[in-house]
Image (tube, rainbow, N blue to C red):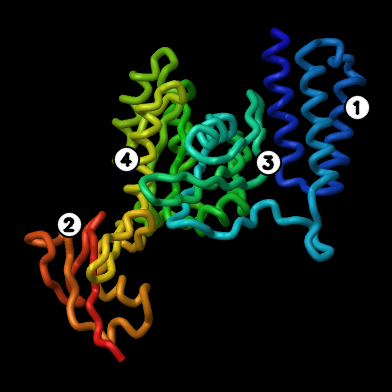
Amino acid sequence: MSNYTKLKWYRFNIARRIWNLEGEQLIAELEVIIQDIRNKKLDKMGIFKLQIEELENMISQAKAKPKVKGREHDSFHIPYSGDGRIALFGLSNVGKSTLMNAITNTDVKVGAYLHTTREALAGTLEYEDLKIQIIDLPGFLDFSEDWAISKQIVRVARTSDAILMVIDLSMDIDRQLNFLLKQLEDAKLIIDGQTSYKLGIIATKGDLPKSKEKYEELMSKTNLPVHPITIKSEETLENLKKMLFEQLDVIRVYTKKPGQKADLEQPFVIYEGSTVADVAKKIHTSFTDRFRFARVWGKSGEFEGQQVGLEHELADKDILEIIVERR
């Protein structure tokens, strides 16, 4: 067995031992693991020296973790923000954190070992006047005898508008897909093949050998939308941003005051199928009662500046002008 293979399996053992540990329990277990490495004289190898450094860094982070009113800091509590929330959901070390760094304003720590991400992290994706909150969840452990739901991970996924399974094209496609679907089924996010959640798949590492064949294999096994990416390709990342926007089922409606130019910087973000009444309520609670008529420019109208009523259904990037009675 090579030193690299030995380290790989040792890391699996580490991940199993510290899974879901927090605070003093986590620190104590990490210290035991470091001592075990030294007792076995594995720290004489360069790669294990690096592993000890990583473990010591985890101890420092655990000791520095803030407390909230006497209770331990909840590393999975992230307030909802932006115009939509999407959770990245996958096995450990499939590239979620690298992806986060590429498409959001975050700088998530990445590394070629299990559980680089040990808590839920949030970043903001800005796409065509939208702010989309992306949640990077810690990866699941892929142990066939230990396939249990992480309640914390699923708890965050439940609060999201869409859940994107992240699948590594350099790994076993069938096992990854089946494992993630089983987690969603066991958590009752999928029931009898049906779900109320928007689901999709991001296929990472599309630039590696045989990734095309693995992508075709993945496509043959699911009806969910699949988007292959490579961090090295700006085009695939831009296409991904568009796909994430489409997962939210929202539209952007810009408004204008009578006689003035439209505000093309801050749209109202509403669900597909929304009407003039929905935007009117967002502007002011009295607007539906005082409503006279509206004008619309964009895809939902038959012609530019068409006069419409409260029940008119709007389309993405419409410009809306609402005329109300004065009081």
* Discs 1/2, front: 2
Quadrant where the C terminus is found in the figure? bottom left
Residue behind mark 2: 298
Q: Secondary structure at mark 4?
A: loop
Is 280 or 199 nearer to us in this picture? 280
Residue 121 x %, y %? 61, 45
Q: Secondary structure at mark 1?
A: helix
Question: Between marks 4 and 1, how big is the CA–CA gap?
Answer: 46 Å
Question: Between marks 4 and 2, how big is the CA–CA gap?
Answer: 28 Å
Tell me which numbered mark, 4 or 3, is placed earlier along the sequence.
3
Tell me which numbered mark, 4 or 2, is placed earlier along the sequence.
4
Residue behind mark 1: 35
Residue 168 x %, y %? 47, 28
Q: Is residue 49 above or below residue 106?
A: above
Q: Secondary structure at mark 2?
A: loop
Q: Amino acid at mark 1?
A: Gln
Q: Amino acid at mark 2?
A: Gly
Residue 155 x %, y %? 57, 56
